[in-house]
Amino acid sequence: MVMDPKARSDRWRAFYQEEGGLHDMLTDLRRAYFERAADLGAKDTDGLWKLSIASKLVDELDRHVGAVIGAGDLAAHEDEHLARIRKVGKLF
């Protein structure tokens, strides 16, 4: 199944930016991991390590969503650029 990167980007951007959307969910997860780490203390290295990995996974998910959104933005800019080139080509 081939997806239009702009349409996909728009869907993910809407889901990411809506109130209570993915951005808010990821922020809440990060905060919860940070608060839990503060409760563990420095001697619970195993627990801190697990929370660190969980936090990195949240960051990776956030970066992946950003890449999907960015790919759509790039595709839109490419389409606009090609349209301008075609328009100039018709002048000559």
Image: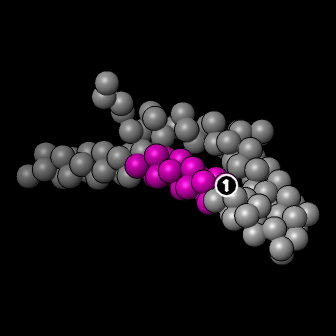
Amino acid type, label 1: Ala
Q: Residue furthest left?
A: 92
Which residue is painted at 38% across and 46% down in the image?
A: 76
Instruction: Examine the residues drawn in magenta and state their main secondary structure.
Output: helix
Residue 59: x and y in percent read 61, 58
The quadrant in which the N terminus is found is top left
Instruction: Single out the residue that lies furthest toward the top.
Output: 1
Q: Position of residue 84 (x, y in %)?
A: 26, 51
User: At 50% across and 50% down in the image, what residue appears?
Assistant: 64
Classify residue 6 as left or right of residue 14: left
Q: Dot 1, crowdedness within 10 Å: few (<14), some or many (≥20)?
A: some
Please state which of residues 14 and 41 is positioned toward the viewer in this rendering. 41
Residue displayed at 42% across by 45% down: 72
In the rendered structure, the answer to whether residue 18 lies left or right of residue 69 reads: right
Left or right of 3 on screen, residue 14: right
Q: Is residue 55 left or right of residue 70?
A: right
- SS at badge 1: helix
Residue 86 position (above or below residue 52): above
Is residue 50 something one can see in this rendering? Answer: yes
Q: Nearer the viewer, residue 62 or 3?
A: 62
Q: Residue furthest bottom?
A: 42
x then y, percent, for residue 53 = 64, 59
The colour scheme is one colour
Say which of 34 and 45 sits in front: 45
Viewer-closest of 29 and 84: 29
Residue 39 among those drawn in magenta = no
Q: Which residue in the structure is indicated by mark 1?
A: 54
- In this view, the residue farthest toward the right is 39
Quarter-wise, where is residue 50 in the image? Answer: bottom right
Tell me where residue 18 appears, x and y as whole percent: 71, 39
58 w.r.t. 38: above or below = above
Magenta stretch: give its range: 54-71
